[in-house]
Image (cartoon, rainbow, N blue to C red):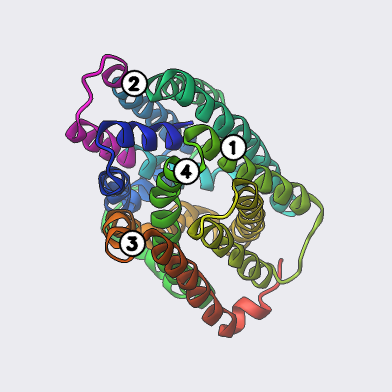
């Protein structure tokens, strides 16, 4: 619900695509700063405890945002500050949550576990996107954010109930040494840093175009929040279909399949550019979701098979850091670029960047040939 509610809260408050980009950038920028710190603490502590602390922090900030919106007192600077605090919280949550899977399942079941975990996540996205759009349309974005705050409280309870193996920490942990160990594990694997470099460009283009220009196109041409919520729900359906496929489909060359699947991200950008009929955009979003899910399961399985467990959260931190480092720029410039060259040209340009960033990855030998363990 939250991305839809936040997008239309900003559009209702100022009507500016650029302001929406600035708020989204404010959430992404702290992730860039704190992800490595989050990865180190996730490798030092019980990972579910890090997740609990992050969820409680997010519940608090989203609750404050909901109160501001519902009382009509929200201002742009407040939205930016709260978005930044949420970015800090997520920077600690992500490395911890990604490192938990190998602690809880046998190695031969890691792919199925990743697929099942993402099926649960993506099933909630279908309901959340559709319900979020409906709530925003009927009652306003404040109520959708309030429900979102409550879900973080529930997440903290579930994470607290996990039972994980005890952490064996070094006698005198050193932040710099642990950071260097994670960097060596990351930089010594060509397939890893090349795909992360690809996603630095790809994510900036897709996130900026889809999340900033998409809601604006929906408001201007497609009927508003309800239709945009339905499009995002179709994307989530694609994620579920991809997850179901990956429960059974066990490709030997995980990275080759993953890189091929990610080309689908260009499709909804092309459809939004015209813009096409909402049904066509929804189908393109479904294909996008399917491609994202195939990539994600293949990627997580490769990471969890190839990276030693004690280093996994730190390597995930470098992965996530490289993947999102340009997203704040993408968010910040999407609106001004669309104002300068037109929304259609900006969306088509983002689609071209998706293809241009992906095709060179196929030239890397490990991407073509690395096989599952």
| Gap between marks 2 and 3 measured at Cα | 28 Å
Determine the residue positioned at 49% across, 77% down.
356
Question: Residue 209 location, x and y as percent?
Answer: 42, 56
Q: Mark 3 Cα within 10 Å, few/some/many (few <14, many 20+)?
A: many
Q: Element under label 2? A: helix
| Gap between marks 3 and 1 measured at Cα | 28 Å
Q: Which residue is denoted by mark 1 in the rendering?
A: 230
Q: Which residue is denoted by mark 2 in the rendering?
A: 66
Instruction: Specify the farthest residue to the right.
Output: 248
Q: Examine the rendering and report whether any part of residue 132 can be seen.
A: yes
What number is the disc on residue 51?
none
What number is the disc on residue 326?
3
Q: Which residues are magenta?
A: 67-88
Q: Mark 1 Cα within 10 Å, few/some/many (few <14, many 20+)?
A: many
Q: Which image quarter: residue 150?
A: top left
* Quarter of the C terminus within the rendering: bottom right
| Majority SS type along the magenta span | helix
- Is residue 87 part of the magenta span, yes or no? yes
């Amino acid at each position: 619900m939250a991305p839809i509610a936040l997008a239309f809260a900003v559009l209702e408050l100022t009507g500016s695509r650029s302001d929406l980009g600035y708020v989204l950038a404010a959430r992404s920028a702290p992730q860039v700063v704190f992800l490595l710190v989050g990865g180190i603490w996730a490798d030092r502590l019980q990972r579910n405890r890090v997740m609990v602390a992050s969820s409680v922090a997010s519940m608090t900030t989203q609750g404050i945002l909901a109160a501001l919106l519902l009382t009509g007192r929200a201002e742009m600077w407040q939205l930016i500050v709260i978005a930044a605090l949420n970015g800090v919280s997520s920077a600690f949550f992500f490395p911890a949550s990604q490192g938990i899977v190998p602690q809880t399942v046998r190695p031969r079941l890691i792919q199925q576990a990743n697929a099942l975990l993402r099926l649960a996540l993506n099933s909630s996205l279908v309901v959340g996107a559709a319900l979020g759009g409906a709530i925003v349309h009927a009652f306003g974005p404040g109520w959708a954010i309030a429900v979102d705050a409550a879900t973080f409280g529930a997440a903290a309870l579930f994470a607290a109930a996990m039972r994980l193996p005890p952490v064996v920490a070094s006698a005198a942990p050193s932040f710099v040494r642990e950071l260097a160990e994670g960097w060596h594990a990351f930089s010594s694997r060509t397939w890893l840093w090349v795909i992360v470099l690809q996603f630095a460009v790809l994510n900036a283009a897709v996130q900026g175009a889809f999340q900033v220009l998409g809601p604006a196109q929906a408001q201007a041409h497609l009927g508003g929040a309800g239709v945009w919520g339905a499009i995002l729900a179709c994307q989530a359906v694609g994620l579920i279909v991809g997850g179901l496929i990956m429960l059974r489909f066990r490709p030997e060359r995980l990275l080759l399949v993953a890189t091929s699947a990610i080309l689908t991200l260009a499709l909804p950008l092309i459809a939004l550019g015209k813009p096409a009929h909402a049904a066509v955009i929804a189908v393109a979003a479904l294909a996008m979701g399917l491609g994202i899910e195939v990539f994600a399961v293949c990627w997580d399985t490769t990471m969890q098979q190839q990276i030693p467990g004690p280093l996994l959260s730190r390597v995930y931190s470098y992965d996530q850091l490289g993947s999102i480092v340009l997203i704040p720029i993408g968010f910040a410039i999407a609106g001004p670029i669309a104002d300068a060259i037109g929304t259609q040209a900006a969306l088509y340009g983002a689609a071209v960047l998706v293809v241009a960033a992906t095709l060179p990855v196929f030239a890397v030998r490990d991407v073509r040939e690395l096989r599952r363990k």
